[in-house]
Every structure is written in C-alpha cells, then in structure tokens.
Amino acid sequence: MLPSLFISHGSPMLALQPGASGEALTRLAAHLQRPEAILIVSAHWENESLLLTAGEQPRTWHDFGGFPLALYALQYPAPGAPALAGEIARQLSDAGLPAALDAQRPFDHGAWVPLSLMYPAADIPVLQLSLPSRLGPELQTRVGRTLAGLREQGVLLIGSGSITHNLDELDWRAGPEVITPWAQEFRNWMVEKLETDDEEALHHYRRLAPSAVRNHPSEEHLLPLFFARGAGGAFSVAHSGFTYGSLGMDIYRFD
C-alpha cells in the first residue's frame, strides 16, 4: 500500500534549484511503488467548499510573480483523471462531505512543482482537491480518513504546504545551516505530537504550539498536513531542513 505524504514545497524556485529537499523528493518517489494516480491537496487552492479537478488535461499554472523567465517556461503536462474525480466526489458526498467537480482548474505550483521532481515524466494522472481552509484541521483530518482507502487502489495521497510559513520574516540571504529558533521550536513540537499521535493537541496547535501564529499567520500551508495524517498511519520524517532561516522544508510520510 502506498503511504500518504506531507510535502513542504517551499519557493517555486524549488523546480529549478531542488537543493536537499528536492533531492529527497526524487529519492522518495524512486522508492515508492509507482502510483496509478495522484491526489494532491495544495495550500494554493483555498475554496469555500470541496472541489476536484476534472479536466482531461489540466494546464500548468504559474501562479506567482517576480521569478526568472526559465521558471515560467516549465510545464507539467500530466493528464487528469475525470472518471476517478467523479468517484472521489461521490465518496466524499456519501460521507457527508459534499464535493463537486471543476473541469477548468489548472495545476497550481503547490502541485506541479514537487511533482516535477518526484515524477518528471508527467505521465501519471493527477487530481487536485481544494482546501476549505476556514474549516480548520478537523475537516482535513476527516477528508483524509474518508479517502484513505484510495491508497489500497494505488492512489498516492499528498498534502502540499509547509511545516512553517511566514514569508514576512524570511532571511533571503540565509543558508541552509541557519535556522530561526522560533521556527525550529514549532517544527519540533509538531513532530513530537505527530510521533505520539496526539490528535487533540494537533487540532488545537494554534493555541498550544510555541509561536504557532508567528509560524503560520494564516493556516493554509499547514492544513494539508492534517489531510495527509488523516489518510495515513504510522508517522515518519522523510526529510527535515530549513531555507531562508525559517521556511521549513520537511517531508513526512504516513504508512
């Protein structure tokens, strides 16, 4: 059975400058059974409700600005999976989680950037599931648990966000050896609660974790972690690191 994964996707420049976390993504994919399809929840598709991409060939969306032209030239032409999208929407709806299809939505960089390092041939069907971020961690845990059975069908479930994400406090000159203490403390607290499977603490991280709001002024980059955890089992750290001082690049798997 495939695991579910949480990926800290970092800057879009990860696609051009993979560094240690990009290399970890490539290694991780090489050691997994080849998926029949991929379902990914990205921090960059916030929505009021649950939606699934349903296009035959979703476009690659360069949903960012101010980066080198080479980044905008990159494409990730993975096929969609409309029939599977319909099945997943029905499964969610049957569980009391109404979901609809969106045939126009392209792949945002929270999806295609990490996938371009994991599966560069872009020959595995990919679906994105939207993130109703206002409904918090509990909903994402429930969505993940509802869809956990897809792993037995060869579907790789991924939450793509960031273990820490405060862009206003990044040090753009810092090397990977520089780690801001408040970011490290938050990351370590999250890992401890994941290791002990303390769901109550995890769901209330904004009140309980050190410097929680400083690490996540808004929740959208951490919420995909709860989807991955809900969909999987035993927790392990596949990669750990920071860029720009406080941007966590951890990768977690739930087997």
Image: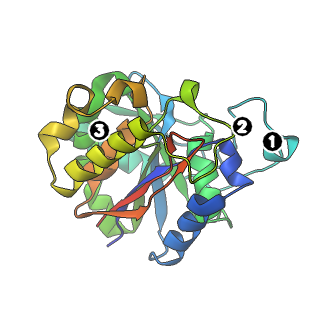
- Residue under pointer 3: 140
Q: Is residue 171 visible?
A: yes
For the residue marked with disc 1, what is the amino acid?
A: Tyr
Q: CA distance from mark 2 to mark 3?
A: 26 Å
- Residue under pointer 1: 72
Circle 1 sits in a helix, a strand or a loop, which is it? helix
Say whether marks 2 and 3 touch (CB < 8 Å): no
Task: Point out the image quarter for the C terminus.
Answer: bottom left
Q: Quick check: 207 above or below 30?
A: above
Q: Earlier in the sequence, mark 3 or mark 1?
A: 1
Q: Which mark is residue 5?
A: none
Q: Is residue 126 left or right of residue 14?
A: left
Q: Quadrant of residue 66?
A: top right
Circle 3 sits in a helix, a strand or a loop, which is it? helix
Task: Point out the image quarter for the N terminus.
Answer: bottom left
Say whether marks 1 and 2 touch (CB < 8 Å): yes
Q: Position of residue 21 (x, y in %)?
A: 56, 59
- Residue under pointer 2: 62
Could you tell me which residue is drawn at 27 percent across and 58 percent down? 232
Circle 2 sits in a helix, a strand or a loop, which is it? loop
For the residue marked with disc 2, what is the amino acid?
A: His
Q: Position of residue 69 (x, y in %)?
A: 87, 41
Nearer the observer, 93 or 240: 240
Nearer the observer, 32 or 187: 187
Structural crowding at the residue carrying mark 1, measured as other residues with C-alpha within 10 Å and reported as few (<14), some (14–19) or many (≥20): some
Nearer the observer, 12 or 176: 176
Could you tell me which residue is drawn at 72 percent across and 55 percent down? 17
Q: CA distance from mark 1 to mark 2?
A: 6 Å
Structural crowding at the residue carrying mark 2, measured as other residues with C-alpha within 10 Å and reported as few (<14), some (14–19) or many (≥20): some
Q: CA distance from mark 3 to mark 1?
A: 31 Å
